[in-house]
Amino acid sequence: MTDDDVLAEFRAAEALLEGHFILSSGLRSPRYLQCARVLMSPARAERLAVALAAKIPADVKAQVTAVIAPAMGGLICGYELARALGVDSMFVERPTGTFELRRGFRLAPGQKVLLMEDVVTTGLSSREAIAAVEAAGGKVIHAASLVDRSGGKADLGVPFTPLIRLDVPSYQPDELPPELDALPAVKPGSRAA
């Protein structure tokens, strides 16, 4: 799947939005990729996950025994990637503000895990999720996402494979360009900024 094919999937799902968006990181952006919309079609979610699985190095695929994703945004894509890789799917969630492995999910000491995100912007939530996996005894050996919008700058602390890398500008709230500042800000994600 080429980058144009991936973007076509987002456009077909009306998931590539234009406006003034407040990202989970608190940064602002004129474009937003609404992964919930692109993943609402099971066939589309499967296509994207299979394409991503094909990009993950073979030695990683041979070692990984589970895919763990942060709730909410990573649930569907994490499940679909686990299915494409033929391994278990689990998730971490923030019941009290910090990621935890719950709901009876368990990891064997040193169990090799792939962390899956929908979109990576700064990498903060990925690093927090990796810390939760490690606190639960697992070892994240690789990370993946549908979209890397960090411009390749996000450091997750582990090797990282996105399905697509996009150079989408993001700004601090007090450093907005005038055309973005003139638009009302919308918070489309699942987490408070």
Image (cartoon, rainbow, N blue to C red):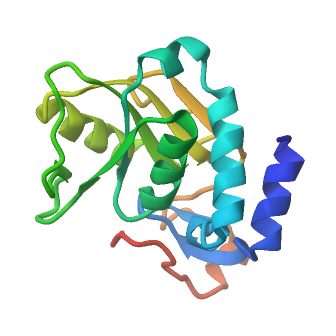
Quick check: 43 above or below 188? above
Above or below 108: residue 191: below
As drawn, is 122 to the left or to the right of 11? left
Q: Position of residue 174 (x, y in %)?
A: 48, 66
Q: Left or right of 69: which side holds 99? A: left
State the image coordinates of residue 99 (x, y, percent, origin top left): 20, 52
Query: Which residue occupies 85% across, 60% down?
Result: 8
Residue at point 46% right, 49% down?
78
Q: Position of residue 65 (x, y in %)?
A: 37, 28
Residue 1 figure quarter: top right
Residue at 21 percent across and 28 percent down: it is: 138
Across and down, in percent, residue 46 comes to 65, 54
Q: Quarter of the image holding residue 127?
A: top left
- Relative to 145, 96 lies left or right: left
Please, which residue is most extreme toward the bottom here? 184
**Left or right for 70, reference 131:** right
